[in-house]
Image (cartoon, helix red, strand yellow):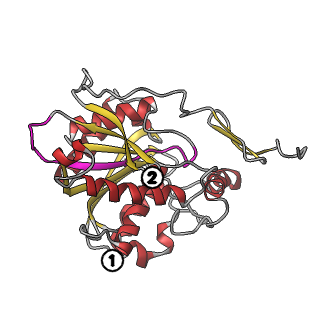
Amino acid sequence: MDPGSDIIEYERPGVVRVYKSGRVERFDGTDTNTVPPCPSGDPANGVASKDVVLNASANISARLYSPAAEPGKKLPVVVYFHGGGFLVQTPASPFYHAYTASLAAAAPAVVVSVNYRLAPEHRLPAAYDDAYAALKAVLASCRPDGAEPWLAAHGDASRVVLAGDSAGGNIAHNTAIRLRKECIEGYGDGVSGVALLHSYFWGTEQVGREPTDAAYRGEFERLWDVACGSQFGPDHPYINPATSPGEWSQLGCGHVLVTTAELCWFVNRARAYAEGIKACGWDGVVEFHETKGEEHVYFLFKSGCDNAVKELAVVADFVGRC
């Protein structure tokens, strides 16, 4: 064995450690720290959940959430992408399971929480490819003869929202960009809405009041570098939409919700996204919600606090109106 193969190449303490050999240790959002689905319905909110395979050939799975609904009643569909810096977490992580079930109940909507491939074993654009394949599978399942019974019975393909937090918000954005470019046969080139929750966007140039400290900025650039295997620079449109306004203006949806928090790492990027998407010529409606005094994705870890309840209501209302 190469004596240098066990050298740590990247580490986010308490979250993940990546070795030069390719070995990865995850300490947060691992497969051993998960909760099972509730096929018969969660007593707390009445939402049933199950793990499903969306695309067997591509090995793409998801956790599906369905609120109590009358037979044949159609509901909006939320295709949700979890956060975790592209490196950690799954739909079965306790706080993601709780959040997506709560969103399904509050909207109400059928929620599909996608289990996309993680970096660095599967570097970007693997997660983007999985997200797009998942969207196609969800839309196909919403047909009366769809392969997934819950979606066939209750999923309304005319009311689909792409949503995600942190890295998942980044994935939702890039899925909507790809949809406008490629279209989906029998569906079109746009979903009803995109909900970007505390999304991970970055870039080399300071935006707003972002810190200028090189070490601080380098943390987010290094994370991106590990996630994409140095294939895409820190100002690639994948991570910095403002560098390609023409592409940004073609975002494949008619409504966008941007949420953030005053102390979020990416608050300045969120503000700039909400302002920039209109300035670039996108012809849609953008809504913006900022929570004072809270940190990045606080609503996952403090789900019972007043601010988190309010932010969930904002997202649920957006889904219901799309």
Whether residue 5 sits left or right of residue 63 in the image: it is right
Q: Position of residue 43 (x, y in %)?
A: 24, 20
* Residue 3 locus on image (x, y percent): 90, 43
Q: At 25% from the left edge and 22% from the top edge, which residue is drawn?
A: 44
Position of 185 compared to 88: left or right?
Answer: left
| Residue 16 among magenta residues | no
Image quarter where the N terminus lies is: top right
* Disc ID at residue 92: none
Residue 117: image location, x then y, percent: 52, 49
Alpha carbons under labels 1 and 2: distance apart: 21 Å
SS at mark 1? loop
Tell me which corner region of the image, top left, top right, bottom left or bottom right, holds residue 158: bottom left
Q: Nearer the viewer, residue 313 or 209?
A: 313
The residue under label 1 is: 281
Span shown in magenta? 69-87
Disc 1 residue type (three-letter): Gly
- Looking at the picture, does residue 200 appear above or below residue 7? below
Q: Amino acid at mark 2?
A: Ser
Q: Quadrant of residue 218?
A: bottom right
Which residue has dot 2 on it? 199
Asked whether 70 falls inside the magenta stretch, the response is yes
Q: For the residues labelled 1 and 2, say whether their Cβ atoms are less than 8 Å apart.
A: no
Give the left or right position of residue 291, taking residue 107 as reference.
Answer: right
Can the viewer see residue 310 in this picture? no
Q: Where is residue 65 shown, x and y percent of the image?
A: 28, 37
**Residue at (60%, 50%) from the top-left corner?**
119
